[in-house]
Amino acid sequence: AAIEEDVFSRALSGETAAFALLVRQHQATVFSLGLRMLSDRHKAEDLAQEVFLQLHRNLATITSTAHLVFWLRKVTVNRAIDRLRREPKIQAVPLEEADGLASESEDQDPLLARQLRALVGQLAPAPRAVLLLRYQEDMDPTQIATTLSLSINTVKSHLKRSLAHLREQMDKASGATGRSLP
């Protein structure tokens, strides 16, 4: 934590190498959130570039490394939601290329994980963001509400409805294949 604060302080003072290190420290989180939100590797890369350019322009407004993490999540999710709202409504494509991201365990069923990612990718932007922040970024509902500027009840409602929808869809899929869910 002291090293991260030092890098942050040096970046804040204008040191280019420190800013580059700051980007490297947080690029996986930003890219992973972008990929899960947008379901497209190239769009996620573009989004990450936009987020870090915006960070460079706004670095002076960031007060600490904790604030930096909060800011990066918020900007990434909000920019992804904006992009999704501008795009024509089409069926999401499964995120096969995202295998191995966001700490998937080695003994996990890859087919089940792929189906779940595809279903998450079909959720509307705001519920998808809530679900990803809760389960990928391990944020509690209060933090999510603050990050997305939503009420706590809206966050809880999105979580409850999204999880119920995912369970229902996974049950349908398992019934069709004869597989049982864990």
Image (tube, rainbow, N blue to C red):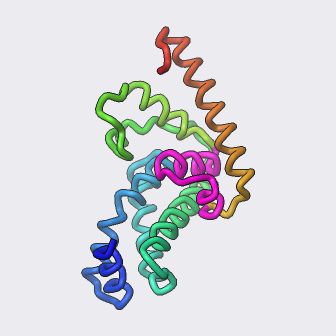
Measuring from the top left, give residue 75's x and y in whole percent: 53, 66
- Direction from residue 147 to residue 155 in the image, left or right: right
- Direction from residue 19 to residue 174 in the image, left or right: right
Q: How many marks?
A: 0
Residue at the location (42% across, 61% down)?
A: 46
Foreground pick, 64 / 150? 64
Foreground pick, 82 / 153? 153
Give the quarter of the figure containing the N terminus: bottom left
Q: In this rendering, is residue 97 above or below 86? A: above
Start-end of magenta stretch: 124-147
Determine the residue located farthest toward the bottom in the rendered image: 13
Magenta residue check for 4: no
Q: In this rendering, is residue 126 above or below 122? A: below
Q: In this rendering, is residue 177 above or below 22? A: above
- Direction from residue 170 to residue 48 in the image, left or right: left
Measuring from the top left, give residue 52's x and y in whole percent: 41, 71
Q: In this rendering, is residue 139 above or below 120? A: below
Magenta residue check for 134: yes
Foreground pick, 57 / 12? 12
Residue at the location (43% across, 47% down)?
A: 40
Measuring from the top left, give residue 55's x and y in whole percent: 45, 76
The quarter holding residue 95 reads: top left
Measuring from the top left, give residue 168's x and y in whole percent: 63, 24
Is most of the magenta stretch helix, strand or loop? Answer: helix
Residue at the location (48% across, 11% down)?
A: 177
Determine the residue located farthest toward the top in the rendered image: 178
Foreground pick, 41 / 117? 117
Residue at the location (73% across, 58% down)?
A: 151
